[in-house]
């Protein structure tokens, strides 16, 4: 196992399991160049041992190993670390095995030879997905009752109007199109629709239409019959069958490949579908909910999205308001996420100082409710005292806060009671330490924010300040969901 014991920089740790030494070397070289920490193992046994010893963020696994079947290794990894994302490496002509791996829970696959950008993109997505899975799993454990997970919380008129619309359309079987920026709660809205419908006892299934190439997505959605393509050795049901009687969320519908758009149009028109490679039609007894953060009309105008499919989906559109348009909800949501994060980490629940609340209210929340949840989690880890101050918030904010306004009924004297925000993590030597990885991530993010702020959003200048090349710096920004544009003027 290659180890880099002296390295303490906050880099995601990738484990590569592949029996080709040359490929291992190459992957390690490429990934390290892009800021990852890499361990390589040539055997399944070594890989599983490495998993026990190190804190791994993602695995790149070749399905053909000398000492084991890759699918078995995948199962073993999942038994040990169910939320750890695994990217499968396949050779041409083994797509069936890759599909099987994805059905068994692999995050995605890459066909050799692959381009650097494909690998880097997939890896960044896989790491983020692992993080979210852990977050969701944490929430489930705490909340226990999943019904309270699916409520769209908030008292603002905007969110109340969305809840009312959902309640009104849920009992009907009409197709619903959820529109809104990332993190505004589209998936949560889809779950609410399902829970309030007559289909609630049946499955709710979500699929990301932008994550798979067309053929694989088709097979995922509709299933396939034996012999439908090379390696299809038996019949397989798809997600339309899995969601039978329930609700199917077609997430990121704006990114669905053109051939899949054609097939979906047919299902919406005829309520019937057939498996890939089969002429036999089956009933599509599912309620379709689609979601996108893209401007679908613009996608239609640009010729990237079928107009006829757009109209079929646009039966009941529901627009999820961005958080900056419902700031009334910020205090309630902030408290909720603080409570959940405190419970997840077994920490006492701090309260939000008025100045910290002012910072929350002044922020523009480009990442919406998801960003607020992440910021509250970061703040609680940095805080280590009984109240959350502005610097705990500022250190975890992805984009700079605007100048905070006084809270209603407060005098400006109360503002001066707080220390000036430092913008960087400030660890108290007396308090218990947060987990290293969380502290590193928070610091890295705060550092990037500060660099972008000083460079007024000019990425090249910020990269220079940070002593990194532009590509690496871009990767870091992507990892933290940051954009130079948010820091301009
Ligand atoms: N009104 C709300 N009340 C409570 N939690 C919310 C609310 N809105 C969003 N969330 C939480 O915020 C996070 C992001 O929500 P969700 O995944 O539904 O957003 P999305 O719009 O589907 O995002 P994306 O477009 O990136 O997929 C989730 O953890 C969700 O539970």
Image (spheres, rainbow, N blue to C red):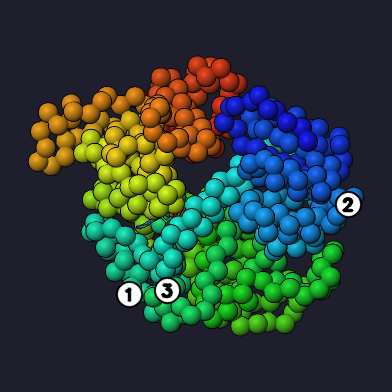
Specify whether 313 is left or right of 282.
left
Structural distance between the alpha carbons of marks 3 and 1:
13 Å
Viewer-proximal residue, 97 or 95? Answer: 97
208 lies left or right of 217: left
Evaluate if marks 1 and 2 touch, with contact meaning CB atoms under 8 Å apart: no
Residue at 44% x, 48% y is 345
Query: Is 332 situated left or right of 47 in this image?
Result: left
Element type where label 2 sits in the image:
loop
Badges 3 and 1: C-beta atoms under 8 Å apart? no
Q: Earlier in the sequence, mark 2 or mark 3?
A: 2
Label 3 element class: helix
Q: CA distance from mark 2 to mark 3?
A: 46 Å
The residue sitting at the right extreme is 66
| Cα distance in 3D space between marks 1 and 2 | 57 Å
Residue 67's tag is 2
Task: Select label 1 or label 2 by which is in front.
Answer: 2
Using a 10 Å C-alpha cutoff, classify the residue at mark 1 as few (fewer than 14 neighbours), some (14 to 19) or many (20 or more): few
Residue 476, numbered label: none
Residue 88, position as x, y percentages in the image = 74, 51
State the image coordinates of residue 353 (x, y, percent, origin top left): 24, 39
Q: Residue at x 46, y 26 (%)?
A: 447
Residue at x 67%, y 40% (from the top left corner): 54
Q: In the rendered image, which quarter is residue 396 located in?
A: top left
Indicate the quadrant containing the N terminus: top left, top right, bottom left or bottom right: top right
Residue 5, x across and y down, in percent: 68, 28
Q: Is residue 480 above or below residue 89?
A: above
Q: Which residue is mark 1?
A: 168
Q: Which residue is mark 3?
A: 195
Q: Is 437 drawn above or below residue 231 in the view shown? A: above
Q: Is residue 18 visible?
A: no
Quick check: marks 2 and 3 in contact, CB under 8 Å? Answer: no
Splitting the image into 4 quarters, where does residue 55 fall?
Answer: top right
């Amino acid at each position: 196992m290659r180890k880099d014991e002296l390295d303490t920089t906050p880099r995601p740790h990738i484990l590569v399991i592949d029996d080709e030494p040359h490929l291992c070397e190459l992957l390690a070289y490429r990934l390290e160049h892009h800021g990852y920490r890499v361990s390589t193992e040539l055997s399944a046994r070594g890989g599983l041992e490495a998993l026990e010893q190190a804190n791994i963020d993602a695995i790149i696994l070749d399905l053909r190993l000398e000492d084991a079947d890759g699918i078995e290794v995948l199962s073993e990894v999942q038994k040990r670390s169910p939320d750890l994302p695994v990217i499968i490496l396949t050779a041409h002509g083994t797509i069936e095995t890759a599909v099987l791996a994805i059905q068994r829970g692999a995050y995605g696959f890459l066909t050799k030879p692959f381009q650097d950008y494909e690998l880097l993109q997939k890896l960044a997505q896989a790491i983020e997905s692992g993080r979210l899975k852990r977050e969701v799993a944490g929430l489930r454990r705490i909340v226990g009752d999943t019904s309270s997970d699916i409520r769209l919380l908030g008292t603002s008129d905007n969110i109340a109007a969305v809840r009312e619309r959902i309640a009104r359309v849920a009992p009907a079987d009409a197709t619903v199109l959820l529109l809104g920026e990332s993190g505004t709660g589209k998936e949560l809205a889809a779950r609410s629709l399902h829970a309030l419908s007559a289909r609630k006892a049946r499955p709710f299934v979500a699929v990301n239409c932008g994550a798979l190439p067309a053929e694989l997505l088709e097979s995922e959605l509709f299933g396939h019959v034996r012999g439908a393509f090379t390696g299809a050795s038996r019949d397989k049901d798809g997600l339309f069958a899995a969601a039978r009687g329930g609700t199917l969320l077609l997430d990121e519908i704006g990114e669905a490949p053109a051939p899949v758009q054609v097939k979906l149009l047919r299902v919406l028109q005829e309520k019937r579908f057939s498996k890939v490679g089969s002429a036999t039609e089956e009933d599509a007894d599912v309620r379709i909910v689609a979601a996108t953060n893209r401007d679908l009309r613009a996608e239609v105008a640009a010729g990237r999205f079928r107009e006829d499919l757009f109209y079929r989906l646009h039966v009941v559109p529901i627009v999820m308001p961005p958080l900056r348009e419902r700031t009334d909800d910020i205090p309630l949501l902030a408290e909720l996420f603080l409570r959940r994060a405190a419970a997840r980490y077994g920490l006492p629940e701090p309260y939000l100082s008025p100045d910290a609340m002012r910072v929350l209210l002044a922020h523009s929340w480009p990442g919406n409710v998801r960003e607020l949840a992440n910021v509250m989690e970061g703040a609680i880890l940095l805080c280590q005292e009984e109240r959350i101050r502005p610097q705990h918030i500022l250190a975890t904010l992805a984009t700079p806060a605007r100048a905070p306004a006084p809270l209603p009924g407060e005098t400006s004297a109360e503002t001066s009671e707080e220390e000036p925000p430092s913008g960087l993590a400030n660890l108290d030597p007396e308090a218990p330490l947060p987990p290293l990885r969380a502290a590193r991530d928070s610091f890295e993010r705060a550092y990037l924010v500060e660099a972008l702020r000083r460079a007024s959003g000019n990425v090249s200048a910020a990269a220079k300040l940070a002593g990194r090349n532009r590509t690496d710096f871009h990767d870091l920004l992507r990892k933290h969901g940051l954009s130079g544009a948010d820091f301009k003027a």
